[in-house]
Image (cartoon, grey):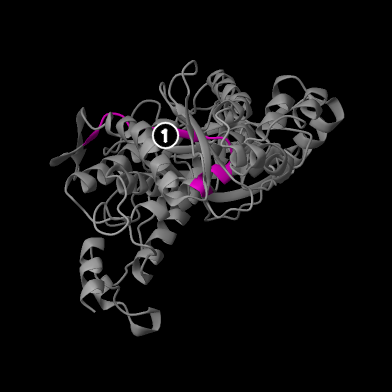
């Protein structure tokens, strides 16, 4: 938890009202999201009990497993869930747009939009990940076949669960994390996992949150006492009232999910959210095309090379996401100012036409002087960036203490055009207030990894080739 977030939590506890910790919305909010509220029996390993799903707040679809311990009932539930989720995902695979690549020399195509799924909390993401793993390898024929839609559902669930691990992705989102990104309550992070209490803090305050804690949970696991007191007798009697009991349990969470969207839509969207949604559409396009081309399901576990490459992508995404949030939001950037990684000042002098001719050819290298009252903790030679001009680098030439603060002399490069005369507005003018930081969202090239077929024995050797489930069944019968 950051210092400013801790302060906001303390203020929330003192005032009884949640405090904003963001000035803009840091995630993409779809015009037609799908809400999915899974429910599983407590104490059972990924045994689905019910789900409430849909894209219309007035028409949720309730899916119920009459006997969660029965294999056929569970896969019938999976088939029903596939009827809801798969058509929704595939509805975005029609319209495409051309995207320039290789500096405009070529183009690629991606879908103009992508699906977005919301679950109440991280437990819902874990449930979908496990349910995807338990369904994507199932065979639709032979012994113990499952409905044809089940393995396809498993592959979609696995894809969405994987994107939830990518910082800044908006394909699969949780309501409590989305709220926690923008508001601080006066309770602990563990208590924030209860959607009802967290939303009550934001909407009404601490007193309402205490009342909400008494209400139904957001899943995915039921309360053991509820299982023993309510569900067990219904299962024993085969009571037809089971669906209505579960609907009553899930409906408050369903209503809260749509209220969360209203809260988030009230915030202006961050400038860099659209570029991250473009990356989400790229990921969705690639996966949908893999499905269309008959590609194999995702492996049970990544090989050594694939795991290392994925870890690097996640690390780069996390770094890029933290920088973009800071550049979009003064409240987020304030944390870096507090730590000395950023400062604000006023340009007092500017030489926009300065030429550096000490090298083999003259280059445009304007210099500016920035005066700041904040503590400056950067050394000469450090490269700084301004969120207002992210493609421009400002190298620290000198830092001089003056009465009331510091004078920082900076030499600029990049973002001014290709001529020896800077483009209008590309060089900060005297009197302009400037924010400077050591953060940078510049491209970070990936590392070099060997081909998976060359994986050394110290890392498990080359991964086993994919064998379709039907071939495995035939080989088992022949042994």
Q: Is residue 59 left or right of residue 478?
A: right
Q: Is residue 15 left or right of residue 368?
A: right
- Pointer 1 local density, CA inside 10 Å: few below 14, some 14–19, many at least 20: many
The residue drawn where x is 64% and y is 32% is: 331
Name the foreground residue: 302 vs 184: 302
Return the x and y of residue 37 as percentages of the image width and height.
Answer: 53, 34
The residue drawn where x is 76% and y is 32% is: 213
Snapshot quadrant of residue 465: bottom left
Asked whether 111 falls inside the magenta stretch, the response is: yes
Asked if residue 5 is positioned above or below residue 204 in the image, the reply reads below
Residue extending farthest right: 14
Residue extending farthest bottom: 457
Residue extending farthest front: 237
Q: Count the marks: how many? A: 1
Asked whether 171 falls inside the magenta stretch, the response is: no
Q: Is residue 103 left or right of residue 447?
A: left
Q: Tell me which segment is drawn in magenta.
A: 110-127
Asked if residue 424 is positioned above or below residue 287 in the image, the reply reads above
Q: Label 1: state its secondary structure.
A: loop
Return the x and y of residue 466 as percentages of the image width and height.
Answer: 25, 66
Does residue 394 show up? no
Residue extending farthest left: 105
Position of the C terminus by quadrant:
bottom left
Does residue 56 show up? yes
Label 1: which residue? 352
């Amino acid at each position: 938890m950051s210092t400013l977030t801790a302060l906001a939590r303390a203020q929330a506890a003192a005032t009884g009202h949640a405090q904003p910790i963001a000035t803009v919305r840091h995630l993409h909010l779809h015009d037609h999201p799908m809400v999915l509220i899974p429910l599983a029996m407590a104490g059972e390993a990924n045994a689905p009990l019910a789900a409430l799903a849909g894209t219309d707040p007035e028409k949720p679809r309730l899916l119920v497993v009459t006997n969660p311990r029965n294999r056929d009932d569970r896969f019938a539930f999976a088939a029903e869930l596939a009827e809801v989720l798969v058509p929704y995902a595939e509805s975005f695979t029609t319209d495409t747009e051309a995207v320039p690549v290789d500096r405009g020399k070529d183009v690629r195509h991606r879908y103009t939009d992508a699906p977005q799924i919301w679950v109440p909390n991280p437990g819902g993401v874990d449930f979908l990940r496990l349910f995807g793993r338990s369904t994507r390898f199932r065979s639709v024929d032979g012994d113990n076949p499952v409905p044809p839609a089940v393995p396809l559902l498993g592959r979609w669930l696995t894809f969405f669960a994987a994107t939830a691990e990518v910082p800044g992705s908006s394909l699969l989102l949780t309501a409590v994390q989305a709220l926690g990104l923008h508001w601080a309550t006066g309770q602990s992070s563990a208590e924030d996992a209860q959607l009802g209490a967290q939303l009550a803090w934001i909407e009404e305050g601490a007193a309402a949150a205490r009342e909400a804690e008494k209400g139904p949970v957001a899943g995915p696991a039921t309360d053991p006492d509820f299982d023993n007191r309510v569900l067990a007798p219904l299962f024993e009697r085969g009571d037809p009232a089971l669906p209505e009991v579960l609907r009553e349990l899930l409906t408050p969470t369903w209503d809260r999910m749509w209220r969360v969207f209203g809260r988030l839509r009230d915030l202006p969207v961050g400038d860099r959210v659209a570029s991250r949604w473009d990356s989400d559409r790229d990921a969705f396009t690639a996966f949908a095309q893999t499905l269309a081309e008959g590609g194999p399901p995702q492996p049970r576990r990544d090989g050594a090379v694939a795991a290392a490459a994925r870890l690097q992508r996640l690390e780069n995404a996390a770094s890029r996401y933290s920088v973009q949030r800071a550049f979009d939001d003064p409240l987020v950037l304030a944390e870096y100012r507090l730590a000395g990684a950023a400062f604000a000042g006023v340009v007092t002098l500017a030489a926009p036409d300065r030429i550096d001719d000490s090298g083999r050819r003259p280059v445009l290298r304007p210099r500016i002087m920035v005066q700041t009252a904040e503590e400056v903790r950067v050394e000469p030679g450090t490269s700084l960036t301004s969120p207002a001009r992210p493609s421009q680098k400002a190298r620290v030439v000198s830092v001089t203490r003056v009465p009331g603060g510091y004078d920082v002399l900076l030499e600029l490069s990049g973002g001014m055009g290709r001529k020896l005369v800077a483009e209008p507005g590309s060089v900060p003018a005297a009197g302009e207030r400037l924010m400077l930081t050591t953060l940078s969202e510049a491209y970070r090239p990936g590392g070099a990894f060997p081909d998976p077929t060359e994986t050394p024995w110290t890392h498990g050797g080359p991964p086993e080739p994919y064998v379709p489930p039907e071939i495995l069944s035939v080989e088992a019968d022949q042994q």
